[in-house]
Image (spheres, rainbow, N blue to C red):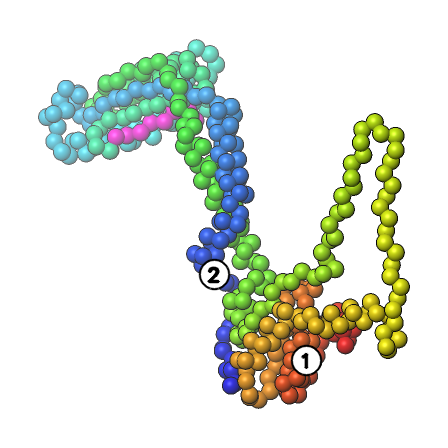
Amino acid sequence: MRMEREEKTFSPGERLGLRDVWEMLFRYRKQILAATVLSALLLGFHAAFLTPVLYRSGFTAFVVNSGTPAELSRLSDADLAASRELAAAYAQVIQGQRVLSAAAAELEGEYTYIDLEDAVIAEADAAAPMLHVTVTMRSGTLAYQTARALETVTPRLAEELVPGSSMTVVSEAGYARRVPVGYGKRIAAGALLGFILPVLALSALTLLDRRVKDRETLERRTGVPVLGTVPTIAREEEKEPPARETPPTEAGSETELAPPEEPEPPAEESSPEGEPAEEAEREAAAAETPNHGGALLAENLFQRLEEGPGMCIAVTGAEDGADGVPTALTLAREGRERGKRTLLADLDLRDPTLSGEL
């Protein structure tokens, strides 16, 4: 049976599927949780101890294009629209140098309009000809005094700018109140930021990781079917012998226990060929012990290939020392035993080790 090679192309910009994202989140769940909590605590600490305390005061005024506020009900729709536009123009005028300089002159102390331009905000109401002026400062007393000064200066200057118009204060400035910091919103924003940034960083690292991790990835990159994988089997020499327990000595005893006597090595018995019996037994055990991973792969491979023309079989691993040479030797011997002409080649040009195994 001849296996046709599938035409597959490898694109450097692979996409992360939903399954990959869930696996990544589960694998790094502790790191992501730690980053989320730490970011929330940092923003909460900043809001509680490093954010300056601010105070706010302000007033509200009616702006009428012509007439007085008492005649507001008699105005036409055109006059109301003109009054709203006039309120928007006044909002810009209040934050200008002329009004702020006049308000600074009313304050006790040496203040200029530069000290007030970042603290004063004037906004026009979109539904009615109303103007809202707020003053935000670190000093509650200064914020209240500035709002009162603007409340006195602004109506007078408005009448000078537009003859016939009027601005009447309907809500006077009160004592300044502390501006809420919003601890909950900042902590929530910190937690969200601490979750999103690690996820984005881990996603980028996963996309940049070019290592082969599973069978599907190898098939997608090479475009050839993978017939089997070799399981990881612990070698006998890598297993550590169990530690010998030393019997405890009795407290107060003057005698010490003698170390256990090591058994004398048995005399070397020569095999009929003249080799030591121990080496002969080791070689016989090695001959009887099969390479489980390679034998399983060879059985699966030759069952699927059956009779057919020659083909090339590549044995590779994700990293160095992945038992590629023993597996290749097992496949070559299996093919030879099945009567196939076998050519074994080592394609590792940097560190070839096949010749040492033959």
Q: Nearer the viewer, residue 334 or 72?
A: 334
Q: Which residue is drawn at 88% across and 72% down?
A: 270
Residue 307 percent across, percent down from the top left: 55, 88
Q: Nearer the viewer, mark 1 or mark 2?
A: 1
Q: In whole angstroms, how far apart are the C-alphas of marks 1 and 2? A: 41 Å
Residue 64 percent across, percent down from the top left: 20, 25
Residue 18 percent across, percent down from the top left: 43, 56
The magenta segment is: 118-125
| Element carrying mark 1 | helix
Q: Which of 146 and 226 is in front in this view?
A: 226
Q: Which of 241 and 142 is in front in this view?
A: 241
Q: Residues within 10 Å of mark 1 (few under 14, many from 20)?
A: some
| Residue 39 left/right relative to 258 | left
Identify the residue position indicated by label 2 in the image.
Answer: 15
- Three-letter amino acid code at the position of disc 2: Arg
Q: Which mark is residue 333?
A: 1
Q: Residue at x 88, y 56 (%)?
A: 264
Q: In this view, does 264 lie above or below 3?
A: above
Q: Which mark is residue 65?
A: none
Q: Does the segment drawn in magenta span residue 123?
A: yes
Q: Residues within 10 Å of mark 2 (few under 14, many from 20)?
A: few
Chief secondary structure of the magenta portion = strand
| Element carrying mark 2 | loop
